[in-house]
Amino acid sequence: MDLSTWFRQLIQSSTDSFLWTVEQFPQERYYLSPRPNRWPIARILYHLLYYEKWIALPSMQQWLDGSLPIVGSMEEDAVREEEAWHAGQGHDMATMITNFRTLRAEQLELLTQFNEHDWQQTRQSIWGTVSLKWVMTKTYQHTLEHTDEVLRAYLWWK
C-alpha cells in the first residue's frame, strides 16, 4: 500500500468532513457551548488549528529535516493553548477555517515527499518514540474525534 497516497486521501477527507460539519451550525451558535462542560464549535476549531500548526505539521517535518517540534509536554502544550484561547485573538471563524485549510494543504504537500522507508522510521516526538505512520494516524484520529464531537452537538443541540 502506498501510504503517502492513503494518508493524502484520509487527511483530505477528514478536513472536508470536519469543515462540512462545522458549516451545519448557524453562525450564532459558533461561540456558545452546546452542553455544560463542552467547548463551543469555535473553540474546537481553534484547538484543531492549534494542534495542526504546533504539533501535527512540525511533527511531519521532522521526518524531512530531523528537527523536533518546539513543544513541551502535552500538559504544558495544553496550558499554552488554553492561554492563547483566553487571550482572545484569532477567533474569527472564517479566518480559522481558512488557516485550517492552509495548514492541511501544507500537510498534503509534505505527504508527497515521503518514501516507503520514511513511514516505518521512528523519531522522538511529543508522544514518545513513534513512526511517521503513527503520527499521521494520530492526526487523522484527532480530526475524527472532533468531527464526531461537533456532529453530536449539531444533532442533539436543542
Image (spheres, rainbow, N blue to C red):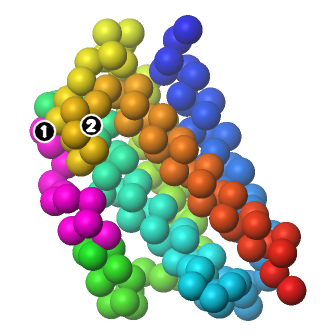
- Residue 128 sits above or below residue 76 on the image: above
**Residue to which mark 1 is pinned:** 67
- Residue 123 sits above or below residue 140 on the image: above
Find residue 134 and report its horizontal and vertical position in percent.
40, 31
**Residue under the point 38% across and 36% down:** 135
**Gap between marks 2 and 1, in whole Å?**
8 Å
**Residue under the point 67% across and 40% down:** 13
Q: In the picture, residue 64 is in which quadrant?
A: top left
Q: Is residue 112 found inside the magenta-colored segment of the image?
A: no
The answer to whether 37 appears left or right of 108 in the picture is right
- The circle drawn on residue 48 is none
- Residue 32 sits above or below residue 59 on the image: below
Q: Does label 2 or label 1 sit earlier along the sequence?
A: 2
Q: In the picture, residue 117 is in which quadrant?
A: top left
Q: Is residue 75 found inside the magenta-colored segment of the image?
A: yes
- Residue 142 sits above or below residue 21 on the image: above
Look at label 2 and name its amino acid.
Answer: Gln
Q: Circle 1: is it few (<14), some (14-19), or many (20+) Cα within 10 Å? A: some
Q: Circle 2: is it few (<14), some (14-19), or many (20+) Cα within 10 Å? A: some
Query: Which quarter of the rendering shows the C terminus?
Result: bottom right
Q: Is residue 24 visible?
A: yes
The answer to whether 114 appears left or right of 25 in the picture is left
The answer to whether 53 appears left or right of 105 in the picture is left
The answer to whether 143 appears left or right of 136 in the picture is right
Range covered by the magenta-colored residues: 67-78
Question: Element under label 2?
Answer: helix
**Residue to which mark 2 is pinned:** 61
Q: Can residue 95 be seen in this view?
A: no
Find residue 6 and report its horizontal and vertical position in percent.
58, 22
Marks 2/1 in contact by CB < 8 Å: the verdict is yes
Look at label 1 and name its amino acid.
Answer: Ser
**Residue under the point 24% across and 48% down:** 126
